[in-house]
Amino acid sequence: MDPTDIAALSSIIGEEARVVTEPSVVEQFSRDFYWYSPVLRKQLDGKIGEIVVQPLNKQEIQNVLRYCHGRDIAVTTRGAGTGNYGQAIPLHGGVILDLMRMDKIDAIQPDGVAVCDPGVRLGVLENEAHKCGWELRCYPSTIVKASLGGFLGGGSGGIGSVANGNLRDFNTVRALEVVTMEPEPRVVFHEGEAVHEILHAWGTNGIITRIWLALAPAVDWSQCVAAFGSFDAAFDFSERVATDAGWTKRLVTTFEWPIPSFFTPVRQYAPEDKSLIFFMIATEQLSSLESAARQSGGEVTYSGAYYGLRTRPLLSDYTWNHTTLWAMTADEAYTYLQCGFDPVTVREQFRQLKERFGKEILFHMEFMKNGVGQVIPGAIPVVYFVSEDRLNEMIDFCREIGVFVANPHVNNVEGGGRYRADNIQLLAKQRYDPKGLLNPGKMATFQPQIHAMETKNQ
Ligand code: FAD
């Protein structure tokens, strides 16, 4: 980009406060949580954009994209920047399109569908939905910071997925609207199955500017922690609760010791050498859950009311990918994988992994419902990083024994485990971004028509 581009983009936005060119600030807007992965850290350190623009509406987005299309300038869309695969890191400089100022909730409809701008923070949406008797079907443990657009663009599921599946399941994303990267950027409506062309595409095939998101009826939740003498006993009990539809739950997370020892603020609920389960359970079932845990040999070390995201302790702060963060805080050599175990052979898979890798892999299980309604043992195991070769050996071994791995150590859409054989995300990119200017370099199967990016900021 040259100074005339900076001047033109500034005048398109027309408000100084919404254009950032100060290099140290642009650098901050160029980062996300890619450093979770020692592999990505090496690849992505130092990649930065050249200007940040903060549009307020889709017309401004169209104006920015029209200009960038004409000048072959890369555009990387960004929500709150909490993605952990470097999804929002600009590989080829250019514009960072920060959508956090587009943060309106237009409606929480009586049928439980929220109509929102992309920059709405998920925590705000959860609170607003609650006022109308609804709640998010699923959310990442970064709920307080993360945006809805970023969740659709780069996330998958989280708390609530044990009951409601992931974002891609059960028509949770009813519809969305995207702005295209063409000479004259269009606004295109995607509904039903067509939302999958855009979901989890990392902003490579359109900018999501409006979202229709299905919610779940709100439940009065409580939190509970149960400790067990062995990981096997904890897993057995958590699996029983997770798979039995009689329990109304939002979170069932199981940790092998010593993972609980990393959770400094709630260390008092983690007896030495015990494996823990963290639950969010319907308040009306709390005492039954406590009794069932005790009958199965567990000790209830904490239970209490949940009154929203300000609840302390907030157990979700230690689950999903927050677990990895606590492990890395304890010892920066820890990293992670994202796995799906086989519900039938899961115990044998555990045994084989332990036999081969011992304490290099620590089990952290997250139960989730899949698209056909079966609750399966997902996992975000904590992995002690020795070398890239050893990490790849572990991934290969997982796949050999039937454990699905969505590899979080690769920086492209397809490599992360969401690749579909029909590659509908690529087909949408060919239609909506034929020059390959949206988050370039992140869709491995895409061949741009013009190789304008190759010389920029390598
Ligand atoms: P960003 O990081 O800003 O963007 C993510 C991707 O979406 C980028 O590729 C970006 O280009 C694209 N994007 C952003 N906005 C748009 C838009 N409007 N249109 C098109 N593309 C867009 N994820 C989970 O799914 N579940 C978890 O439980 C979870 N836990 C996490 C815990 C920690 C501690 C961390 C660091 C991350 C975790 N994540 C999790 C990843 C991430 O926090 C979530 O996916 C979050 O929803 C991303 O939102 P964001 O606003 O930060 O998106």
Image (cartoon, rainbow, N blue to C red):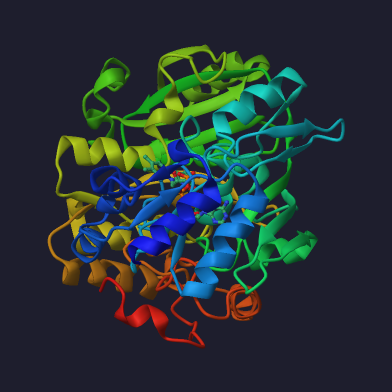
Q: How many marks?
A: 0
Is residue 155 among what the camera can see? no
**Residue 120 in the image, given as x and y percentages of width and height:** 59, 36
Residue 239: image x %, image y %?
A: 52, 42
- Who is closer to the viewer here, 181 or 337? 181
Q: Which residue lies at the image location 58% right of the left edge and 47% below the top edge? A: 149
Q: Is residue 419 visible?
A: yes
Q: Is residue 338 above or below residue 394?
A: above
Q: Which residue occupies the foreground of this view, 43 or 365?
A: 43
Q: Who's the residue at 41% across and 50% down the image?
A: 52
Drawn side of residue 431 relative to residue 454, left or right: right
Name which quarter of the figure residue 28 lies in.
Answer: top left
Q: Position of residue 80 (x, y in %)?
A: 45, 41
Query: Looking at the image, which residue is at 23% across and 66% down?
Result: 43
246 versus 168 height, above or below: above
Of the 4 image quadrants, the one containing the N terminus is bottom left
Residue 307 falls left or right of residue 174? left
- Residue under the image location 50 percent in, 67 percent down: 68
Q: Is residue 46 above or below residue 98?
A: below
Please state which of residues 368 and 432 is positioned toward the viewer in this rendering. 432
Q: Residue furthest right?
A: 110
Q: Position of residue 79 (x, y in %)?
A: 49, 45
Quarter placement of the C terminus: bottom left
Which quarter of the figure has residue 62? bottom right
